[in-house]
Amino acid sequence: MPFGLVSAWNKRRRSKSQDHTDPWVYKPVEHWKLEDQTSQPIKRRRGSSVFTLKEMEEATCFFSEENLLGKGGFGKVYRGTLRSGEVVAIKKMELPPFKEAEGELEFRVEVDILSRLDHPNLVSLIGYCADGKHRFLVYEYMRNGNLQDHLNGLVETRMDWPLRLKVALGAAKGLAFLHSSSDVGIPIVHRDFKSTNILLDANFEAKISDFGLAKLMPEGQETYITARVLGTFGYFDPEYTSTGKLTLQSDVYAFGVVLLELLTGRRAVEINQGPIDQNLVLQVRHLLNGQKKLRKVIDPELSRCSYTIESIVMFANLASRCVRVESSERPSMAECVKELHIIIYTNSKGISMPMHKLRMV
Ligand SMILES: Nc1ncnc2c1ncn2[C@@H]1O[C@H](COP(=O)(O)OP(=O)(O)OP(=O)(O)O)[C@@H](O)[C@H]1O
Ligand SMILES: [Mg+2]
């Protein structure tokens, strides 16, 4: 259970340091009321601000449609302005009664894990609201929304190749940090890595979001066996789905799917297609390892002068290794970060050369 592990970690951390962060607990209603009356800004620790329902309503103008940013499986996400003037994103839990217990668990895991992590490629949790039955998560506001909307043309900005490489590197660094056990002392599997959970700030810096399904993997427990496979269709590690064995490499598979989305501009799952064409990995896997075949999969929206074929070949090769069926054959996230650095260097060197010197497909 994630809570068992989180509290084990809490104990370990407390014994290590005096300057510890207390385990996360709901504060009593009286405490929220007291906070609600103070007009003074409250000194805040990361992820630890506790908000009242009234504050959430005020921040979003009573959850007005103009403030709606998007909708996911957990509920709606609104843009909001806190009393301090800070602009934030507020996720409101809206679940049917039979899913509330599951939602409550995701809510707690999200707060418990995310409030302890600090990395430029992970979205920051500012605080939460647990007022009666109401649940809200308050995050830093990510001006450029999620990656999928950019790739699928739902947003005006056209993403050229260097920008896609920057996003891939940012996301890789975020995942490598989770897997490296920094901050928490235990490696973490994200378990729901996908292009809608890669958010982009004003400078298109990628930040990973949604830790509600995350799982701590203590030393000696490199595999977690579960009877219930959780995550998103299209990003599932085939080994995890067939055996129930969750490993850090399950995130690497999902990362490979996102690399393919960046390369092709296609969706991980295209529901209007037949069974093979529905799944991006099945659609393109056999086309990734030959320059000629690769031409068929490059996103036609990509401007030709923004990429070199060398960098595309290297990128496709990395993606194809990430989505291998055997999890042991996939690279680690640290290796992905290194390779992406080289790919970025190769591309920037190539595009600064005159066009006639570039090798064409
Ligand atoms: N911190 C944020 N800043 C700006 N926009 C955000 C933020 N968090 C979420 N959003 C927007 O709200 C949308 C819905 O997010 P949410 O995480 O609820 O669902 P999802 O990831 O799209 O899908 P699912 O819940 O099915 O996994 C996102 O796609 C994104 O565009
Ligand atoms: Mg999300």
Image (spheres, helix red, strand yellow):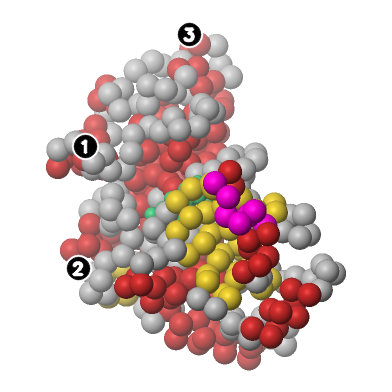
Mark 1 and mark 3: span between their CA atoms? 41 Å
Q: Amino acid at mark 3?
A: His
Count of numbered tags = 3
Mark 1 vs 3, N-terminal side: 1
Residue 217: where, in percent of width, then height? 42, 74
Per the image, the residue denoted by label 1 is 272
Mark nearer the viewer, 2 or 3: 2
Across and down, in percent, residue 282 comes to 21, 41
Residue at the disc numbered 3? 356
Crowding at dot 2, Cα within 10 Å, few <14 / some 14-19 / many 20+, comes out as few
User: Residue 328: horizontal and vertical position, in percent?
Assistant: 29, 60
- Other residues around mark 3 within 10 Å, as few (<14) / some (14–19) / many (≥20): few
Q: Is residue 328 at least partly visible in the picture?
A: yes
Question: What residue is shown with label 2?
Answer: 243
Q: Nearer the viewer, residue 207 or 34?
A: 34
Identify the secondary structure beneath mark 3. helix
Chain part drawn in magenta? 59-65
Give, as a three-letter code, the residue at label 2.
Thr
| Residue displayed at 26% across by 39% down | 270
- Callout in the foreground (1, 3): 1
Depth check, front residue: 91 or 123: 91
Q: Residue at x 28, y 57 (%)?
A: 237
Counting from the top left corner in percent of width and height, residue 165 is at: 50, 37
